[in-house]
Image (cartoon, rainbow, N blue to C red):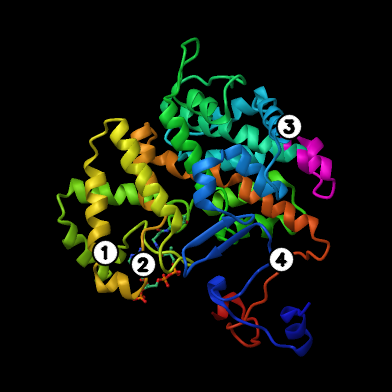
Amino acid sequence: GFNLGKLLSTTGYTTLDGGFVNTASTSSAITYIDGDAGILRYRGYPIEQLAEKSSFLEVSYLLIHGELPTTDQLADFTHRIQRHTLLHEDLKRFFDGFPRNAHPMPVVSSAVNALSAYYQDSLDPNDPEQVEVSTIRLLAKLPTIAAYAYKKSVGQPFLYPDNSKTLVENFLRMTFGFPAEPYEADPEVVKALDMLLILHADHEQNCSTSTVRLVGSSNANLFTSISGGINALWGPLHGGANQAVLEMLDDIKGQGLDVNEFIRKVKNKEDGVKLMGFGHRVYRNYDPRAAIVKKTAHDILGKLGAQDELLDIAMKLEEAALTDDYFVDRKLYPNVDFYTGLIYRAMGFPTRMFTVMFALGRLPGWIAHWREMHEDPTTKIGRPRQIYTGHTERNYTEVSAR
Ligand code: ACO
């Protein structure tokens, strides 16, 4: 087909598009988004149907392999993941080296990167069998790593995974349970968390996914590439937004601020205040995930009996923003992160774990993109051009003469 990049390079032209606002970095058959119509589909399936009917592992299989699994395929996939949930005992000790007050995101990304040191038999990006093994290892071990990062931060002992449980049950038990004590996760919480993971599972060429592709394009191994994605996700303009939303709501409550007064500050860009959880590069109408999450926030908070004043503030903010010209004119609507933090909080997760929860969900998407890139024989190393704006040539001056 037509290749604009090739045409421009042969004609000597370079395009400059800061933030890739109009530039595609790749073609992809994984996720379809229509930002104006508020449509999100994984492999053609609408997100609303997957959120209602599917499971996180089934969606992971769909994203990575392109089709929904048969009963046998799903059973085999689940079984292989369950067999790989343990961390190497030495890797467990890796967590001891971090300060107790460390944010869990760098702990998690470091541990994921360390997987390339422990599992050297599955690092070759050009060997499909090794890629499959590292895929399974990542899907199986990230929940264990995430739970250990949490346990470390609260000074509690690590629990071994219990492979008779589902991925989500196991994660909740390793996070909130104690050794030698039975732990039964609330089925409503399990269901809601599984659904949240589905909603986060892919979002085409977002900042972290593009990072995973770019790192992987150098033929760096899958573990290392995913670790890069986790670091990109940590930023408050991306996955860190769910934490930032909760902090914003806490601030508004703590300072006894009036919602309208806060909105005024945002509009005047006072102290660079933004309405966190609002706005999206692609969705300029509404974020279909936000609609699902808003309902879940009400359901789960209702069921857990959590009287959350922050939910009231969030609803007032949303109402004020949706009727305000500043937000309407700029097409700023709540994104998926606006409500997820409230749900995680009601489930008992501390604010600092929110972005880790996002990483758990996004993992299959990152893997699917990395694999799609490697399966395409035309893939080249990612190497953007630049427009140089520095000095023209000048001569070196001796330090004494400066
Ligand atoms: N609050 C107030 N004003 C905003 C917000 C916001 N949340 N988002 C955008 N704007 C304003 C900008 O100031 C700009 O106004 P101007 O034209 O007067 O300068 C206009 O809307 C356009 O915004 P851009 O920054 O150009 O939009 P961009 O596509 O670059 O940014 C982003 C998208 C980063 C998501 C932005 O909306 C933002 O910072 N939102 C808050 C953080 C957030 O919630 N991130 C989560 C993203 S979703 C996810 O990762 C799951």
Task: Name the residue carrying label 3.
Answer: 72
Q: Please say if 173 is above or below 113.
A: above
Name the foreground residue: 380 vs 114: 380
Q: Which of marks 4 and 1 is in front?
A: 1
Tell me the crowding category of disc 4: few under 14, some 14 to 19, or many 20 or more residues within 10 angstroms, Cα based.
few
Q: Tell me the kind of residue under disc 4.
A: Gly
Q: Tell me the kind of residue under disc 2.
A: Leu
Is residue 388 rendered magenta in the image?
no
Q: Quadrant for ligand 1?
A: bottom left
Q: Tell me the kind of residue under disc 3.
A: Asp
Residue drawn at point x = 78 percent, y = 43 percent: 131
In space, the residues marked 2 and 1 are separated at their CA atoms by 8 Å
For the residues bearing labels 2 and 4, Cβ distance under 8 angstroms = no
In space, the residues marked 2 and 4 are separated at their CA atoms by 32 Å
Q: Is residue 158 visible?
A: yes
Mark 4 element type: loop
Numbered marks: total: 4
Q: Which mark is residue 179?
A: none
Circle nearer the N terminus (4, 3):
3
Residues in magenta, as a range: 117-132
Could you say which quadrant of the image residue 107 lies in?
top right
Name the foreground residue: 271 vs 283: 283
For the residues bearing labels 2 and 1, Cβ distance under 8 angstroms = yes
Residue 333 position in % (x across, y down): 36, 63
Name the quarter where the C terminus is drawn: bottom right
Task: Name the residue carrying label 4.
Answer: 382
Residue drawn at point x = 71 percent, y = 40 percent: 135
